[in-house]
Amino acid sequence: MSRPIYVLNGPNLNLLGKRQPEIYGHETLADVEAECRRTAEELGLGIEFRQSNAEFQLIDWIHEARESAGGIIINPAAFTHTSVAILDALNTCDFPIIEVHISNIHKREEFRHHSFVSRVASGVICGFGTQGYPLALMRMARLLEQQTAV
Ligand code: DQA
């Protein structure tokens, strides 16, 4: 099997479904993981689905991914807007990176409009609710196909 796609989730996403459902919806992170597993299986991809509230943990997982993954899909949550350290870690990876946000960050407070991670992302999906995750996996599959085609 090809290298797995790491699907990384940042702080407070463990509370998905309970946390501001008017913004993030009623699905839990376990629901999102199940949907990702279904989609990944259809696409013939393996996934590592993880969440942490700690910046260092996300960085350590990115370091792990750079050795063993085929790509990263990341919702860095609030670290999107603050973390040069996560950007630096992602910059050490030489595979596709896709940034996902459940909400439309551009429609929200000014401080959410800037993303450090977007500088390194192949693309960004935001505002499609949790459907953004399976959409990101579909895009990842296409990017990987294009890589092997050349
Ligand atoms: C988020 C948007 C961020 O601004 C916020 O801090 C989050 C979640 C999203 O998925 O919409 O925690 O990344």
Image (cartoon, grey):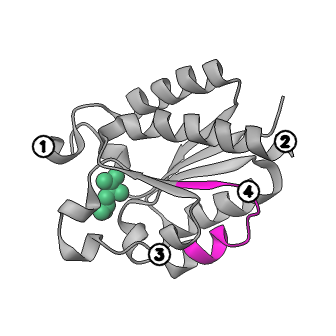
Q: Dot 1 corresponds to which residue?
A: 22
Between 70 and 123, the one lying in front of the other is: 123
Range of magenta residues: 87-98
Labelled pair 3, 2 in contact (Cβ < 8 Å): no
Q: Farthest residue toward the bottom?
A: 84
Labelled pair 3, 4 in contact (Cβ < 8 Å): no
Mark 1 or 2, closer to the camera: 2
For marks 4 and 2, the one nearer the N-term is: 4
Under circle 1, the secondary element is helix
As measured in the structure, the alpha-carbon distance from the residue carrying label 1 to the one carrying label 2 is: 41 Å
Above/below status of 149 relative to 93: above
Tell me the residue at 17%/70% (across/down).
Answer: 109
Q: Dot 4 corresponds to which residue?
A: 95
Q: Dot 3 corresponds to which residue?
A: 116
Tell me the residue at 66%/38% (across/down).
Answer: 142
Q: Dot 2 corresponds to which residue?
A: 148
Tell me the residue at 53%/73% (across/down).
Answer: 119
The quarter of the picture where residue 137 lies is top right
Labelled pair 1, 3 in contact (Cβ < 8 Å): no
Mark 3 or 2, closer to the camera: 2
In the rendered image, the quadrant that contains the N terminus is top right
Which amino acid, mark 2?
Thr
14 left or right, relative to 68: left
The quarter of the picture where residue 146 lies is top right
As measured in the structure, the alpha-carbon distance from the residue carrying label 3 to the one carrying label 2 is: 29 Å
As measured in the structure, the alpha-carbon distance from the residue carrying label 1 to the one carrying label 3 is: 26 Å
Mark 4 or 2, closer to the camera: 2
As measured in the structure, the alpha-carbon distance from the residue carrying label 3 to the one carrying label 4 is: 18 Å
